[in-house]
Amino acid sequence: MFNTVQIICASEKDRTILRGIFRNLGADAVFSADLNDALAVLEKTRPAAVFLADGEEPPAEIQLRELRRVAPFLPLVPLLKRRDASRAVALMKAGALDCAQSPWTEEELRPIYRKSLRLGGTEIELDGSALRRRRRLLALGLAVSVGLAAFAAGLFYGFRKYSPAEQRPRSFYLPYAHPTGIVAKEDSVLVSDWYSQGLYEHNMKTFGIRKVTSLPDITPVAMAASRDSLWLARTDGVIEKRLLDGRYTKAAATKPFKPAADSVCYDGLYFWTAQSRTGELTKRMPGDSLDTIKTYRYPGGRLSAIACDTRFIWVADPARRALVKLSLEDPERIVSQTQIPEYSSRSLKITAMDSKDGRIWFAGEDGDRALAFYEEEPK
Amino acid sequence: MRKSRNKTASIPAEIKTSLDLPPLWGRLGFLSPEEAEVISHFELRTGKIVALGFELGRARFEEVRGRIDKAMRDGDGYFTYSISFLAPEQRALIRTAIEQSL
């Protein structure tokens, strides 16, 4: 938008005020001390509008007349020094587009400055139907716009709903080779590795490593988490309870369990440990000592890792190449089983699992590489 | 009803909103005996009763009472007010003035 405006104002104080206002409005303001000065530079500046301070010499009416003589279609705006409607109307009759009242502020001048770049006229009529017709047309236009917007929204919704979902990777190779535990958090995934004795926190979407915590004093073989704790099972059968602070500070440790658990999970009420060689599942109290409540025998083929949620125990069964769902009340009863496609790799060994928000997360070794992946929970 | 249309330069108008406050001003964007559209950079609320003062041809109207039915703000910050005239006798005078000016 062409934004040069000419301002006729003799007072240095007023010019300072107006300079700041027009600068804030984004206008390129050219100041003239009086009418003669303004007329002299009008050809050169070719302003989009002229603003003239009222109450100076010559009177605004004369300034309007002379300016209209030179530039009849140029918007002219007197700046009144007080609110005087009679004078404003008189100056508008004399050719002013509008008048600004005092005090001159950015808020007061903004609409007038913007309107000064556009003009119109009064339509007069005996019958008001034209106005109503115009309103009907406006309403019709509005209805068409709303209809189009609704159509576009429907199209967008339909596109979102029925177009194929964006393919996101659901399997990730890990930069370490011996994962033993996996815990899915809100937007990250924590994986323990026995060989490097570390906890790796990954971005859930990209699996880039966010943080590594070294555990030099233990070799983690399994991991589970509750809302406020992290449990790490050690090779010697001890299960440590750690705080979910930045360094996973040790809070408690059990006595060594025999045989040592190599998979653990927490169902929100009880703690579960599993031993892959014997196929035993043990239900435990969730206290620091993880006292045994009852031991069950896995009813499927072979147990390699377990996960729990508040409804089921999930088991990765390499013999059946399946994800087996067990009842929490009776873990010796299989509720269902679903094939795990990743088991098509004969060398895959799932070592860790977790259940979070309808997804079952797995970590394991595949030859000399380690990977993590997830499956949507089977219905 | 006979329909007549004409277009003239926007008519400046005084807008009285209260006896206590100095009047405001704007322009008539549309005028008929029943209603008018007033364009002004001053903000007024819908439902307010205002008194308009303007000239049409040789006739001068003072304190034509009307109610603001609608107010719309344009992209520049100007308001367009749809005002319906309240007094039948004033409507008749406006009708006469329009007939004379057409």
Image (cartoon, rainbow, N blue to C red):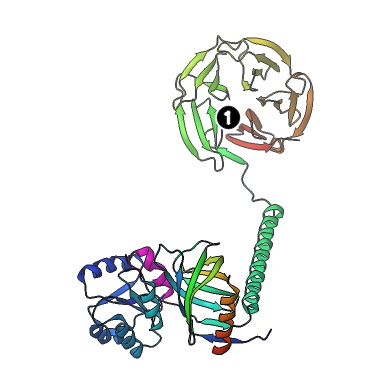
Q: Is residue A277 above or below residue A79?
A: above
What's the residue type where badge 1 is placed? Answer: Val
Q: Is residue A108 magenta?
A: yes
Q: For residue A316, what is the image quadrant? A: top right
Q: Quadrant of the N terminus of chain A?
A: bottom left
* Secondary structure type for disc 1: strand
- Circle 1 marks a residue in which chain? A
Which contiguous range is marked in magenta? A95-117
Q: Residue furthest left?
A: A12
Does residue A195 appear in the picture of this structure? yes
Assess disc 1: are there few (<14), some (14-19) or many (≥20) residues with their C-alpha within 10 Å of its C-alpha: many
Q: For residue A54, what is the image quadrant? A: bottom left
Q: Residue furthest front?
A: B89
Residue appearing at x 64%, y 51% in the figure: A166
Residue appearing at x 56%, y 70% in the figure: B82
Residue B21: image x %, image y %?
40, 63
Q: Quadrant of the C terminus of chain A?
A: top right
- Is residue A45 rendered to the left or right of residue A313? left
Q: For residue B42, what is the image quadrant? A: bottom left
- Is residue A64 rendered to the left or right of residue A180? left
Q: Is residue B7 magenta?
A: no
Residue appearing at x 55%, y 78% in the figure: B30
In this view, the residue in front, B35 or A178, is B35
Residue B37: image x %, image y %?
54, 73
Residue A9: image x %, image y %?
25, 75
Residue B8: image x %, image y %?
51, 86
Q: Is residue B57 above or below residue B72?
A: below
- Is residue A221 rendered to the left or right of residue A345? left
Does residue A119 appear in the picture of this structure? no
Mark 1 lies on residue:
A183
In this view, the residue in front, A378 or A62, is A62
